[in-house]
Image (tube, rainbow, N blue to C red):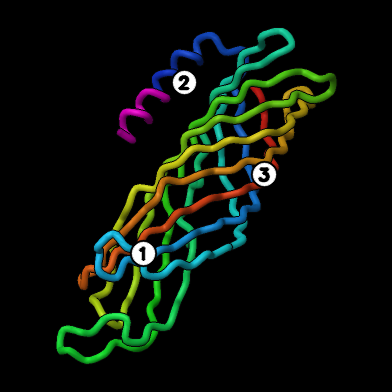
């Protein structure tokens, strides 16, 4: 499904390019608050045994390409944004005591550790805008996809190393100002990612519900 959506958006972007009035490229700096709700189902029986809410502030950069069409007092923009590096999305540790026994029957105790690294983070978006004088106010509707590399160590199971697909949808609002060939854009957006889950070798299912609230400043050039 993800490949179909990416292919469809790429085809729409290429078709839109033929009628676009301008192409725009630029860089973006973002400050984000990532809120995660992590749930553990120790016996994978459908019952949540533990729940933990995690909040993490991160800063990152990205590059983007846009095609824009002038519609009088309105504009319509299609674009793609790429975070061109891998980054640690989250890292957490927690103590475990007698939650689940080892294979030899001994009680489990110690510290569980886990990290999630994100790579190839792409956002495909459309931005309808309305001219309000010196600025253009726009909204953002986007589809987000990335690879999430989950790595963990548990005192009661073997280590975990798995690559997952992290997908979601983005909604935002912002303003952009043109300076004759250059532009500056300020945006606030929220991304709701689909739940991701992994199951350890001792049949513990871990599920994460991730949300991302971001304030971004972009600068770029129009051609």
Residue with the most extreme bottom position? 106
Q: Which residue is drawn at 42% across and 60% down?
A: 117
Dot 2: element? helix
**Which mark is on residue 13?**
2
Q: Earlier in the sequence, mark 3 or mark 2?
A: 2
**Which mark is on residue 48?**
1
Q: Please name which of the two marks, 1 or 3, marks the residue nearer to the observer.
A: 1
Q: Find residue 114 and report its image quarter.
A: bottom left
- The chief SS type of the magenta part is helix
Q: How far apart are marks 1 and 3 (CA)?
A: 36 Å
Decide which of 130, 103 is in the foreground and name it. Answer: 103
Circle 1 residues within 10 Å: few <14, some 14–19, many ≥20? some
Q: How far apart are marks 3 and 2 (CA)?
A: 23 Å
- Residue stretch in magenta: 1-9
Find disc 3 in the rendering and name its residue: 216
| Mark 3 in CB contact with mark 2 (< 8 angstroms) | no
Q: Distance between the residues labelled 2 and 1?
A: 43 Å
Q: Find residue 191 and report its image quarter.
A: top right
Decide which of 46, 196 is in the foreground and name it. Answer: 46
């Amino acid at each position: 499904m993800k490949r179909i959506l990416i292919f469809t958006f790429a085809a729409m972007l290429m078709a839109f390019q033929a009628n676009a009035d301008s192409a725009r490229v630029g860089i973006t700096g973002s400050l984000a608050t990532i809120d995660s709700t992590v749930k553990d189902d120790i016996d994978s029986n459908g019952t949540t045994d533990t729940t933990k809410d995690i909040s993490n502030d991160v800063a990152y950069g990205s590059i983007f390409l846009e095609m824009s069409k002038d519609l009088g007092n309105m504009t319509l923009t299609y674009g793609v944004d790429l975070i061109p590096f891998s980054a640690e999305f989250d890292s957490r540790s927690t103590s475990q005591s007698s939650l689940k026994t080892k294979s030899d029957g001994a009680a489990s105790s110690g510290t569980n550790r886990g990290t999630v690294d994100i790579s190839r983070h792409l956002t495909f978006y459309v931005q309808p805008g309305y001219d309000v004088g010196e600025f253009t106010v726009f909204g953002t509707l986007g589809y987000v996809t990335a690879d999430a590399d989950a790595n963990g160590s548990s005192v009661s199971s073997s280590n975990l190393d798995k690559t997952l697909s992290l997908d979601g949808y983005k909604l935002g609002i912002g303003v952009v100002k043109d300076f004759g060939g250059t532009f500056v854009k300020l945006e606030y957006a929220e991304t709701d990612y689909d739940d991701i889950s992994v199951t350890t070798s001792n049949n513990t299912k871990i599920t994460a519900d991730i949300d991302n609230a971001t304030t971004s400043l972009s600068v770029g050039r129009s051609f």
